[in-house]
Amino acid sequence: MSIVKPSLIAALFLMLACNSTKKEVSADKISGLQTSKVLQSNVVKLKEVVKTLSDADSFPRNIKKDKTDWDFVGVEDWCSGFWPGVLWYAYEASNDPEMKAEAMRFTAPLKTIAYSSARNHDIGFMVYCSYGNGYRLTGNEAYKDVLLSAADTLATLYSPKVGTILSWPSQMHKFKYNTIIDNMMNLELLFWAAKNGGDTSLHDIAVSHAQQTMEHIVRKDSAVYHVGSFDEDTGEFLKGYTHQGYADESMWARGQGWGVYGFAVAYRETGDKAFLETSKKLADHFLNRLPKDGIPYWDFDDPNIPEAPKDASAAAVVACGLFELVNLVEDKELKAKYFKAAKDLVSTLSSSEYLSGDKNQALLLHSTGHYPKNSEIDVPIVYADYYYMEALLRLKNLEKLNSETDKVVAN
């Protein structure tokens, strides 16, 4: 997670404040208090939940239907880094030393991932969400060493012929050399490492991967393929597929979110306007197709809509991506548009329909993992909680800047 720069966002809120009535400013201030209240409530809940978890190498992943407690996975599951990441966000929100200690406890077992042979692209999710947040918040040099090693390990999956990181070595029998849209999220580890003592080639790998993804996996209809298949010998793009969506040419909601967020980060790290335009294109298409209640179905083209399940995790991912865009776009109206859209997503997720409350140990209800495989359908999933906490923190920081700008305008 990268917190937005105050100098850029202040201009947005200065514009908003100058064009707002006192009533509108007051409403924003009330909303800011609600954001802090939701965050604090989440921290209290997480603090109670983590007390029930004794094994630091077992990580919450989902809660089955009609159950209240988390089901767990091991260190090598692609979701293992999200739970320590949730705890780091809880520490960031509260400055509670107990939450810091718990975040450290669940982060430690993931060290082995950085020094193992790369099994798939998910090293970024596993290590950057845990050790990355830990290093950002503590400056622990031991965490930095793990991150740099993890980046080197991830880079071993890169093919110069194809120009991308191989996402799923285990799926080459099905998709040949494959690169998935999710992998855009793991490039941030490479960008970070290249700036923090790692080899500069890591930056070049990330740029090449983003360019190839933009050219072949982003479709002309402003949606994305889940999987791009390539010839590993020639680098030729062969075909776009789905794996977790409804159909190859459908719009899988979470995949769209990975694209919005991932390309925004790629622009932030490179200044390549093509990446920014791609992120904006994907974001606008997502927002234009949202249903009336503001939360996407698992796939926008499921023929069973409106009976199809929702995906709160996709909403949370897109909210984070939109907050990233707020910091990057120059047009003031576009900044305001993306801020409002992200805030609306977070507000709906914070409603009684999606916030778990005392129903179970998770923060959010109604996420969908792998619908075609009948896996994790309409249940709490840990990565939804992770990106929800990130979005709340981003919103809180922006609202704080909004409040500070109001004071400047008033004086």
Image (cartoon, rainbow, N blue to C red):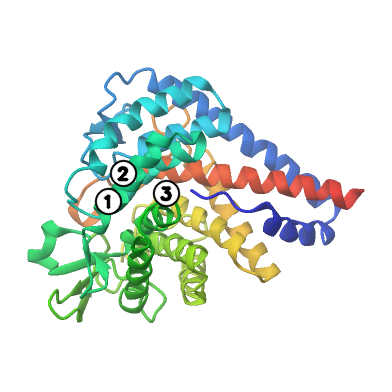
Q: Which residue does the image show at 34% across and 61% down from the upper left?
A: 202
Position in image of residue 381 (x %, y %): 34, 41
Q: Is mark 2 on a helix, strand or loop?
A: helix
Of circles 1 and 3, the one toward us is: 1
Q: Is residue 155 left or right of residue 270?
A: left
Q: Which residue does the image show at 34% across and 29% down from the upper left?
A: 106
Which amino acid does the dot numbered 2 rest on? Met
Report, in whole angstroms, how far the alpha carbon at label 3 lies from the one at label 2: 21 Å
* Location of mark 2 (residue): 126
| Quarter of image, res 266 | bottom left
Position in image of residue 411 (x %, y %): 92, 48
* Location of mark 3 (residue): 312
* Location of mark 1 (residue): 122
Which amino acid does the dot numbered 1 rest on? Asp
Asked if the residues shown at circle 1 and circle 2 are in contact, with their CB atoms under 8 angstroms apart, the answer is: yes
Q: Is mark 3 on a helix, strand or loop?
A: helix
Q: Considering depth in this image, is 157 or 185 the residue closer to the camera?
A: 157
| Quarter of image, res 207 | bottom left
Residue that lies at the very extreme toward the right in this rendered image: 411
